[in-house]
């Protein structure tokens, strides 16, 4: 009872700690309590104080104030009361929290000790789980089936008949803490997204949305709450990965070699702990609200189908996860960077016991065997990461900030260049460096620019061939999807989009060996071997089946909608179009993008020298990538300064003529009706008119050309008719109406035949223009006012 009361008092102290001195005192109290009680006597702390401590560390009990009362908040009180957020501006507090939460700190050591005694079990709140897991647990499937779906659920899904919930997640202390640790950036991203929505939803929300494309009416200055920079979380993330996850995936083979290696004391705790931690981050950060969370072969093997697309919808991933994912991905891909072409072997041994200071870092000594191959942790993150990046590009809403998309983009770039990642990038996270750099404002995105002490420029080498081939879609198909994103958001931030395109092409053309490998696989993918011996003579053929399977699996259900423009059309997940010569190939799409970028630069104000240089670099990179130079338009960039230069000769999204260019020369992916919705259109009306136009085109058969229509003139054969007397005007009127109907039918057939012959389609999307709709509204208001005034005058006149 004494320990129970002390734990209760400690929880009260922790919950009341808001200011930095109070937080430091609470950390000291937690440290003192854990050191004073043995591991088998600290159950009261983990049942009472640990949930309160987690709540205050990550600020899960914060209730954001309404936007109207934000200015009236106390000046001395921070925007967030989470301890980890306050540590961003207080290095001393950050060091105190780091000492408490580090893997070799007293808290994690005590958690490991209490788990060995199996003293406590926790039920994680189902509403905080990744969305697909939440829906899976609420389904009627038994827990035994759900446990076998993925390693994260194995042994942790239990039935709960008391609470009335079909299933629940039961965790030990380490798993419970890491679940909350992984949930923190998700909660933070969701909170910031909801705050942005609340700010936009005001009394004038619809008017602001309506006039967002009119520069005269929209405001250029909008207040936004700055996100505090905090490297403490990233340092803890790297510390946990470094302590519990080997850079090579552990091989769980206790009886691998001989009886000489057999040990009765073999313990798989380290293997299960590492696997749990990686899958926790993958499911919380990458998968989360993905409507296709599991590979298709897994669903087929279990005979399961998840109708999550109707429930989750086409929602983008949680914003603000770029930095944490970059640390995770770089760490897991750093194994091959460290070892190069070497093959290191390590085996499991005995799990360490708690000695003295309860040093958990000794658990890395148990990892003595592991195979260094591409099939290590990379195989775990391939599909989730690909779908995370692709969903971020496809489902990014119009009008959203490009900041999150930029973070996801540079995450993708770091994944494309694992050979450019050195161990020195993680030096700032080493225990010896943590206390010096904690609380700083360094940006991880720029860490590669500040590498010091490296005399060797890491580049692609043939040793990375297996990595590129196993991740080929990141170098090919994802590039095509990114071009769709670039076309969609070019007008919002032309400089950022140009720089991102320049970065992609720079990586693809940085090495001749890398470009030759990508081209080689593309040629093999689109060709059929003339003889069976070709399979043995060309190693690229053996990767084609896996690439085809990845296309089907990784892009399951993901495709641009008709309104946003589908670059790959109906064959979006059956083919690779990076080197295609068609109008939906990368070459033509990049040409169109350069033309649009030139126009956006010409009409923009300010310094555009960087954008012009990036465009010139893009042209040279396209020459290397496709082997043919990109023709520059006759309109030079210097003409932007000429006040007499007409804009009618420049490409614009609505009028794609450039000088003497015609619609046949420049078309938006062959179907102008399916271009991305711009700010000059009413979005819902545009989608409605697109669907109505598609229905009319299908009804009249305008989607395909029938050769029989142009075979010759239509011959109408009239049979013998008997002359009959017309009695009365009713029969005469019927005959006239029938004659008019037949004439209208002939005229309709002639028009449809003419449209089919000239491949003309119905496109009612032009009626969705905001200018046209505004004119209709003004005309309706004018007519209504005229009627009201007429009625008023008519009432007053007799008087």
Image: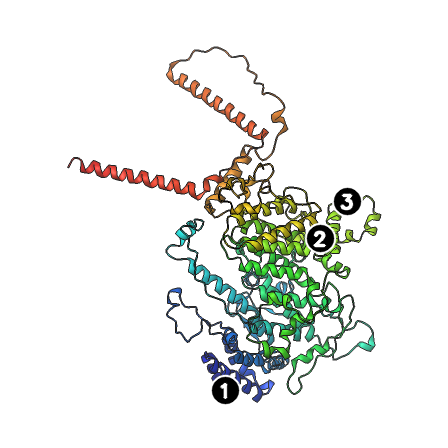
Label 1 Cα neighbours within 10 Å, binned few <14 / some 14-19 / many ≥20 = some
Is 219 placed above or below 58 here? above
Residue 6: numbered disc: 1
Image spot of residue 76 (x, y percent) = 41, 76
Residue 120: numbered disc: none
Say whether residue 29 is left or right of residue 77. right
**Residue at mark 3:** 528
Looking at the rendered structure, the secondary structure element under dot 1 is: helix
- How far apart marks 1 and 2 lie (CA) works out to 59 Å
Image spot of residue 9 (x, y percent) = 47, 85
**Residue at mark 2:** 547
Choose between 316 and 43: the one closer to the eye. Answer: 316
Choose between 593 and 454: the one closer to the eye. Answer: 454
Q: Quadrant of the C terminus?
A: top left
Q: Would you identify the image quadrant in which residue 314 lies? A: bottom right
Image spot of residue 649 (x, y percent) = 54, 40
Which badge, 3 or 1, is on the more N-terminal residue?
A: 1
Is 377 placed above or below 774 here? below
What residue is shown at x 55% (from left), y 39% (from top)? 657
């Amino acid at each position: 009872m004494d320990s129970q009361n002390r734990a209760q008092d400690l929880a009260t102290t922790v919950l009341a700690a808001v200011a930095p001195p109070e937080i430091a005192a609470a950390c000291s109290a937690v440290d003192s309590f854990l050191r004073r009680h043995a591991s088998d006597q600290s159950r009261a702390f983990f049942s009472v104080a640990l949930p309160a401590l987690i709540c205050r560390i990550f600020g899960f009990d914060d209730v954001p104030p309404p936007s109207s009362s934000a200015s009236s908040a106390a000046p001395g009180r921070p925007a967030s009361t989470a301890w980890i957020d306050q540590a961003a501006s207080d290095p001393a507090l950050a060091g105190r929290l780091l000492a408490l939460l580090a893997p070799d700190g007293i808290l994690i050591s005590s958690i490991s000790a209490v788990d060995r005694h199996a003293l406590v079990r926790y039920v994680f709140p189902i509403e905080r789980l990744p969305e697909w897991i939440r829906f899976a647990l609420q389904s009627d499937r038994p827990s035994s089936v759900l446990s076998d779906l993925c390693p994260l659920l194995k042994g942790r899904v239990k039935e709960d008949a008391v609470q009335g919930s079909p299933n629940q997640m039961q965790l030990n202390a380490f798993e419970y803490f890491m679940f909350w640790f992984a949930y923190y950036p998700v909660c933070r991203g969701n909170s910031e997204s909801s705050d942005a929505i609340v700010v936009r939803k005001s009394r004038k929300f619809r008017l602001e949305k309506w006039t967002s494309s009119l520069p005269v009416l929209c405001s250029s200055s909008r207040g936004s709450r700055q996100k505090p920079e905090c490297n403490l979380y990233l340092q803890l993330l790297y510390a946990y990965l470094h302590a519990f996850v080997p850079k090579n995936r552990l091989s769980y083979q206790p009886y691998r070699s001989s009886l000489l290696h057999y040990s009765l004391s073999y313990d798989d705790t380290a293997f299960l702990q590492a696997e749990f931690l990686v899958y926790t981050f993958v499911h919380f950060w990458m998968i989360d609200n993905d409507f296709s969370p599991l590979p298709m072969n897994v669903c087929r093997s279990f005979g399961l189908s998840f109708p999550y697309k109707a429930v989750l919808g086409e929602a983008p991933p949680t914003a603000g996860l770029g930095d944490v994912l970059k640390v995770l991905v770089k760490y897991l891909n750093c194994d091959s960077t460290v070892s190069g072409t070497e093959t290191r072997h390590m085996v499991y041994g005995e799990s360490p016991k708690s000695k003295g200071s309860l040093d958990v870092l000794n658990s890395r000594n148990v990892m003595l065997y592991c195979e260094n191959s591409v099939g290590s942790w990379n195989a775990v993150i391939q599909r989730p990461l690909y779908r995370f990046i692709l969903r971020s590009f496809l489902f990014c809403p119009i009008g959203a900030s490009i900041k999150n998309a930029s973070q996801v983009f540079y995450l993708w770039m770091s994944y494309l260049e694992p050979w450019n990642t050195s161990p020195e990038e993680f030096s700032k996270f080493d225990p010896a460096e943590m206390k010096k750099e904690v609380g700083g404002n360094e940006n991880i995105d720029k860490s590669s620019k500040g590498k010091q002490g490296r005399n060797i420029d890491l580049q692609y080498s043939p040793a990375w061939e297996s990595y590129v081939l196993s991740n080929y879609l990141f170098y090919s198909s994802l590039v095509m999807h990114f071009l769709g994103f670039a076309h969609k958001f070019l007008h919002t931030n032309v400089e950022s989009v140009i720089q991102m395109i320049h970065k992609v092409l720079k990586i693809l053309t940085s090495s001749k060996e890398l470009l030759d490998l990508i081209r080689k696989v593309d040629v093999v993918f689109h060709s059929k071997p003339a003889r069976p011996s070709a399979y043995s003579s060309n190693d690229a053929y053996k990767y084609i089946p896996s690439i085809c399977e990845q296309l089907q699996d990784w892009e399951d259900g993901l495709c641009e909608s008709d309104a946003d423009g589908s670059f790959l059309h109906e064959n979006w997940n059956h083919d690779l179009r990076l080197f295609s010569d068609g109008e939906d190939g990368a070459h033509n799409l990049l040409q169109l993008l350069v033309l649009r970028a030139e126009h956006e630069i010409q009409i923009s104000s300010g310094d555009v020298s960087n954008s012009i240089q990036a465009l010139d670099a893009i042209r040279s990179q396209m020459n290397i990538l496709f082997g043919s130079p990109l023709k520059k338009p006759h309109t030079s960039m210097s003409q932007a300064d000429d006040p007499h230069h007409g804009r009618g000769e420049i490409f614009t999204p609505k009028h794609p003529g450039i000088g003497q260019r015609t619609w046949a020369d420049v078309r938006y992916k062959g179907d102008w009706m399916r271009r991305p919705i711009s700010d000059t259109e009413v979005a819902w009306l545009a989608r409605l008119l697109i669907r109505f136009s598609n229905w009319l085109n299908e009804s009249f058969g305008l989607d395909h050309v029938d050769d029989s229509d142009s075979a010759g003139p239509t011959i109408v054969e009239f049979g013998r008719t008997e002359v009959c007397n017309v009695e009365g005007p009713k029969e005469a009127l019927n005959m006239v109406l029938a004659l008019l109907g037949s004439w209208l039918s002939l005229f309709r057939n002639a028009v449809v035949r003419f449209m089919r012959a000239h491949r003309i389609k119905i496109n009612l999307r032009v009626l969705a223009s905001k200018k046209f709709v505004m004119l209709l509204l003004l005309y309706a208001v004018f007519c209504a006012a005229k009627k009201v005034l007429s009625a008023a005058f008519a009432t007053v006149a007799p008087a």
